[in-house]
Structure formats: structure tokens, C-alpha cells
Amino acid sequence: MRRWVLEVVKLLAAKAPRLERALGKIARSGGEAVLIDGTLVRTRRRSGNANRKNYSGKHKVHGLLFLAVTDDHGNLLWISAAKPGRASDITAARHNHITTKLREAGLGAIGDLGFVGLDDDPENPVIITGKKAARKRPLTPAQKEANKLISRERAANEHAFADLKAWRILAKVRMNARHATDLLRALLVLTRLQVTR
């Protein structure tokens, strides 16, 4: 990429809100919960061992993992730094201290089954997830209904990712993780200007 393009991307990325500010803004506006989810942005496969960590066994492609926080209407609030594709949602959330920052802001979060077990205080949880079925312990009808309700609330989060991934430049990222983080944060700023629900 040309140097001036990287500079423009960095300038836009600097406008992206940090997690504490985004959560604080929601708390001040009277919000009670945010939506959290992870997504894999596909990357070009590089040769050798250097790119093994970017292979996602879940998606069976090479990519970078990003976490995003949205409000209950599906507006993007924050996007994390890139993690290798082999990382899981829960690992990325722990690295970003999501539960601590939610507690500090006085907010809760709704997440998918990838965040089960993230909350370190089961007596006072800040992240609500569905229940996973086990081989010898199927879900009860009440648990299935609770999972449906949580999925219905999380649908707005998927719209936010769809808005972000509509940018053609994300068809297959051909850059390292640091530049990809700047690119995604710059696109977050542009997406927020373009889409407001």
C-alpha cells in the first residue's frame, strides 16, 4: 500500500472510539446493555509457518479475529485490535478485559455461545449468554426458549457486521495485523458516518 494511503487510514482509525469511552457514552445515555460478538475477516494465505496462527479451524480459512461491541440498535460502537484467526472469541474478550470494563461502566452485555464461561463472577454476571447442550444433558424447553430470546436480541449485532463487511476492501485483506486493525477502525468511523439506526 502506498504510504499516503496508510497515513489517511491511520488518521481515520485515530477517530475510532476506545472501549471505555464507547461504554461510558452508552451508560450516560441511559443504556443498560450492549451486544458483543466476534467475526473473522478473511486474509490471503501466506506461505510457511508464519501464517499458521491465522488459520481458523472453526471457519477453515485464514483470517484475523475482531471483536465488536454494538448498541441494541446495531450501531457499531467499538472494534478490537486484530487477533490471529486461531484465537477464540472468549480469549480475545479476556485480552481486552471486557468484563472489567463493563462493570466499571455499569453495563451488561449479551453474547453468543462463544462467550460462555467468560464472566468471572457467576453470582453477579455482566455477560448474558445462552446455554450449551451436553451429550448427556440436553437442553430443557425453558433453556431452549431462553436461547431463542437471546438470539433474537443479538440479531442487531449481525446487521452491524454486515454493514462493516459491505466494504469491498475487506473481501480478502492482504496486510499484517497492525495495518488490518487500523483499516477496520477506519472503516468503523466511515460506517458510523454512513449508517445510523
Image (cartoon, rainbow, N blue to C red):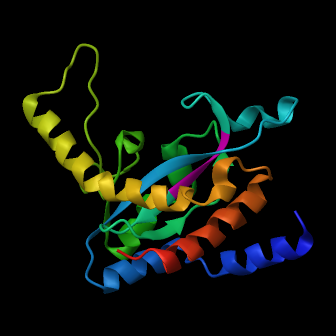
The reply to whether residue 131 is in sight is yes
Foreground: 48 or 136?
A: 48
In the rendered image, the quadrant that contains the N terminus is bottom right
Q: Quadrant of residue 143?
A: top left
For the point 17% across and 26% down, the residue is 139
Compared with residue 185, is residue 176 higher up or lower down, i.e. above or below? above
In the rendered image, the quadrant that contains the C terminus is bottom left
Q: Residue furthest left?
A: 142
Compared with residue 20, is residue 175 higher up or lower down, i.e. above or below? above
9 on left or right of 92: right
| Position of residue 22 measured from the top left corner of the image (x, y, whole percent) | 46, 77
Compared with residue 89, is residue 164 higher up or lower down, i.e. above or below? below
Dominant secondary structure (helix, strand or loop) of the stretch shown in magenta? strand
Q: Residue furthest bottom?
A: 28
Residue 44 forms part of the magenta stretch: no
Foreground: 29 or 196?
A: 196
67 on left or right of 75: right
| Position of residue 47 measured from the top left corner of the image (x, y, whole percent) | 87, 31
| Position of residue 146 measured from the top left corner of the image (x, y, whole percent) | 15, 43
| Position of residue 174 measured from the top left corner of the image (x, y, whole percent) | 79, 49
Compared with residue 119, is residue 182 higher up or lower down, i.e. above or below? below
Q: Residue furthest top?
A: 136
The segment highlighted magenta reads 63-67
50 on left or right of 116: right
The reply to whether residue 98 is in sight is no
Q: How many marks?
A: 0
Residue 65 forms part of the magenta stretch: yes
For the point 27% across and 76% down, the residue is 31
